[in-house]
Image (spheres, grey):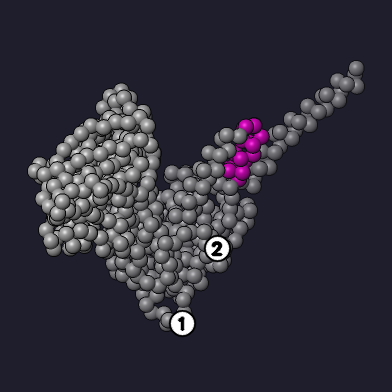
Amino acid sequence: MALKSLSWRLCAALALFCGYSWPHAHSALAPENEVPLRPTTWLAEEKITPITLPKGRTRRLYFMLKKETAAMSVTVSPCDLPIEWSLAARTRKDKPHKSLQWSTKKSMPEVWWRGSGTDEKMHSFTGSAVDTYRGPSYPHASIYILKLRSKQQNTRATVYLHEGLGPSGTFPLLPADPRVHTLGVGMTSVTLSWAPSASITSLPHTQKSYDYCVLVNTQQNYPSLCAARESMRREKDQKQENKERRRRVTVWPILKEWWWQQWDSYAEPQSPPSSSSLSDEYADLQCVCQGTENVCTVSELLPDTQYYLDVFVNDKLNGTSMAYEGTFARTHEEARAVITTLREGELRWVTFQDRGSSSEQFFSFRPRGLQQSGLLTLQSCGGGEKVKVTVSSKGQVLTSQAVGGDLAHIWLQGSPSYLIHLEREETTMGRTAAATDPALPGGLMASVKMQTSSAYHRRGVPSLPSTLQIKSFNRLRGCNSVTLAWMGTEERSLYCVYRRNLGGREAEVGRVSALTAPCLGPESRSDTERVLCKYFQELNPRRAVTTAVIGGLEPGMAYVFDVYLMRRWGIPIKYASKMVKTRKEC
């Protein structure tokens, strides 16, 4: 027990002795005006020095000039965020005592801080653009101090020191007017021009160490290539982060990520990268135009969208670049198509002009009734011309087909409204037919006959005759009458017969034109040409044949007979014209 108490007292005495004696020893080595030891970074001349700027932390760089140096320039290039930087010259009245130099392990700048001296502020700047101080060296300066600080968040910058008069030749030269001008703006393209850089115009054609790079984006103008690359990196990281959110997150990945972020934020650059590494840093940038031409057309853009356009001149050898004053432009919006509303049961002729007109037209139709059903009937009247019809609803295509001379029915069902898109399909036969077809007005390339109607109780398209040919019976042909026959349908429908007499020459010359007019409907015929109208219905399609005896004709005359199937829905169906000549003698 006595042994234990003795050992405890011994430890306590030793602790008291060490605790009181250490501060006295330390105070002998450190005076009262001791300046805490801080790292010193010397700025090398004629070299690009990259600097990491943590948020809210001031970085200091020091440099000294040679005695014979009359002028100097300091260029600071921020990456993507605004920074504050200033340049000052430190002067001393007296040289520091040798005892102060060797009293502690201090760097040379800290020894000068402790002495009596003044700081002469030479330059200051705040912003994200590249800024250069050019001026004479300070006559009484012993050391120069460059201070840099970022208030927003962690960022980077590069510093370049040049001793002497004139440009350093490390950075490309910008013209007196560094603005980017917009020559023309289209719906999907923008044309730019800018004044050429003297770095490019002064070089021979064999050397290609400089070139332009044009970047386009929809966010903002970039003050430097570094800012453009950082923006692309953040966008890529954001996409990757969105993917990782779906995965299960544990505690260790969060701590690991935080640790590396803190390490990277305060990591000091060990050595400045070479020019080749700087060129590789921007190799992933997608330049829409690259070369030595000072005119660029950016294509494949979206209509009615604002784009920001930047031009950079690059020095491939030194790995540096300078930015022109970027511009922005908004592409033109797409020409909105005129959509015509179709009325119930309206018969409409759709024409495409030969010149100066669009080859497509849009229509809308809203069927009546709760069933939301309708019938679209179309027929091309351009001979060999075909028209493509596309029906859609709420952006979804329901049907699409080509319509020719034969009647086409499209059943509409299930939507409150429909968008009908007609587009011309040009053919050589269509051009010839349009020039010779009397059914088309002059100057029309194609014509489509169209009608839309609501179908309240129908469940599908109406039935059509098995053939549209008209038959005449030679044995029943007389001097004042002829007998015609045609096929009908199982539905009760109205059939109307029209006639037109032909003269001697017209019977030979106009025969072809009379037979090739499929779109001549009853609305284009005179009431005096109508011979008769009759209803007909036969449930058996094979026996759906009806006949009509046409009287009151003149002997030895040629007549053209047309039969129209008149229906409640859709446009009338015209049978093929039939020319019959009465007998001269009976």
Q: Which residue is mark 2?
A: 280
Magenta range: 248-263
- Spatial CA span between label 2 and label 1: 23 Å
Query: Is 314 rendered above or below residue 51?
Result: below
Q: Quadrant of residue 385?
A: bottom left
Q: Could you tell whether 466 is left or right of 23 in the image?
A: left
Residue 53 covered by magenta stretch: no
- In this view, which residue lies farthest toward the top? 1
Residue 144 position in % (x across, y down): 46, 61
Residue 391: horizontal and vertical position, in percent?
Answer: 34, 41
| Residue at left offset 26%, top offset 27% | 368
- In which quadrant of the rendered view does residue 378 lie? top left
The front one of 542 and 35 is 542
Q: Residue at x 88, y 21 (%)?
A: 4
Disc 1 designates what residue?
A: 206
Left or right of 144 in this view: 546: left
